[in-house]
Amino acid sequence: MVEPTVVEPVRPEARRAARARGPWWPTGALVGVLAGSAVLVPLAGAATWRLALLAIAVAWVIDASRLRAPAVERVVPTELVRGVAVGLRVVVAARPGVRVRVRQPQTADLRVSPAESEDVLAAELTPRRRGRHVLPPVVVRSTGPLRLARRDHEAGGELEVAVHADLPGARRLALAVQRGTFRDPGHRRGPIGLGTEFDRIREYADGDDVRRLNWAATARVGRPMVNQHREDTERTVWCLVDAGRLSASPVGDRTRLDLALDAVAAVAATAEALGDRVGAVAYDERVRRTVPPRRGGAATLVRALDDVEPEIVDSDHEAAYAQVSGTKRSLVVAFTDLLDEAAARPLLDAVPVLVRRHAVLVVSPADPELVTAVTRPPGDRRSLLVASAAAGLLAEQDRIDARLRGAGAQVIEPLADQLPAACVGAYLRLKAQARL
């Protein structure tokens, strides 16, 4: 099951005096008092002017003396999923009469909304990139009871957070597979319960294959029941992740590499649930990360790939595929981008070597902008040119698909939001066909 989220209740340094960020500062109210006294007090004489200034100075010192470091409590998970917002809460215990405004600074990779508030900050923290990131200390601006002095303090210290691919979503898909309720977005059939070894009888779900109805159980309980079969176990799955220049291209608010790693998490979690071994190779012009296949290692695999980022270099598919070509028969899931024939040529050369020994599945997320450009009604000459170019690219990708299938590989190109489920569905179909 998914590892529990770690929460930072109150860091030890947050209980002690926070660090001051700078000196005491006058407020707008103090400036207004000084401006008013400069106009009115001189009319009463120089002595009164000096007394007024002294009184204002004493009041400012008293006000500033109340601005001691407040106690700050910050509650935030330290294990995050890229793109998934989590709650962040900061509570400041200020001295009586002191007004505080709390701010959680954000970074390019960790977005906070809202970023500041009075007294208590209840915000959402959204991580935008995988890897390890640092959440800056909380900044508290305190204003004295007389509203004449203010000071900023830092509290809570820097907090390191880990941002992962979507393992929780992957676990949900794996659970659906285990329960026999998983629906493959690439096929019209209903929930998949694959394999040839009988597992259990369960209640019929909408879309189930009627050929699996257990008529005796149906008659006995008075409602439709179906047979579910157990998956073969102890198979090996390799996920080959292309982290070269093409993986840096965006699909919506994510890169192709981000999409691939979410799908890797889904395949790994499903393999774990079915008792298969799963490993991974991440590569560009060289092999950057190898995770040997093991059972029950989905979380380890996902975390091992957290810090892999795209490199703007051409990928060496043959060198990466050589890492698995000599192993025993496995399912090899190759995540890459089938942009055009020139870019795909190294892949086309490498796949025939793999299929001699392994079942090969090539995965490339469809570009929604290309699909939209082709299907959208043309409005002007420019849109016609865009549609024509998009149609040409899609036709070229179809030719690449045909060559890969001709070499013996399976190819899927689902939309981004269907990618994890489509990969799981293809994996299950290959198991059911005894291709592994």
Image (cartoon, rainbow, N blue to C red):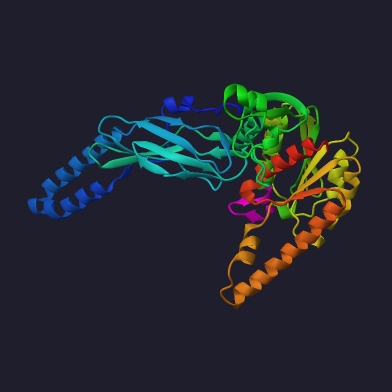
Magenta-span inclusion, residue 256: yes
Question: x, y (%) of residue 415?
Answer: 65, 52
Segment colored magenta: 248-258
**In percent of the image, x 59 and y 54: which residue is there?**
252
Question: x, y (%) of residue 11?
Answer: 48, 27
Of all residues, the one furthest to the top in this rendering is 220
* Image-quadrant location for residue 422: top right
Q: Decide which of 90, 82 is in the foreground and name it.
A: 82
Q: Is residue 412 above or below residue 170?
A: below
Q: Is residue 166 visible?
A: yes
Of all residues, the one furthest to the left in this rendering is 44
Magenta-span inclusion, residue 170: no
Would you say 251 lies left or right of 282 here? Answer: left
Q: Decide which of 245, 424 is in the foreground and name it.
A: 424
Q: Quadrant of the C terminus?
A: top right
Q: Is residue 363 above or below residue 1?
A: below
Q: Quadrant of the N terminus?
A: top right
* Image-quadrant location for residue 307: top right
Question: x, y (%) of residue 391?
Answer: 70, 67
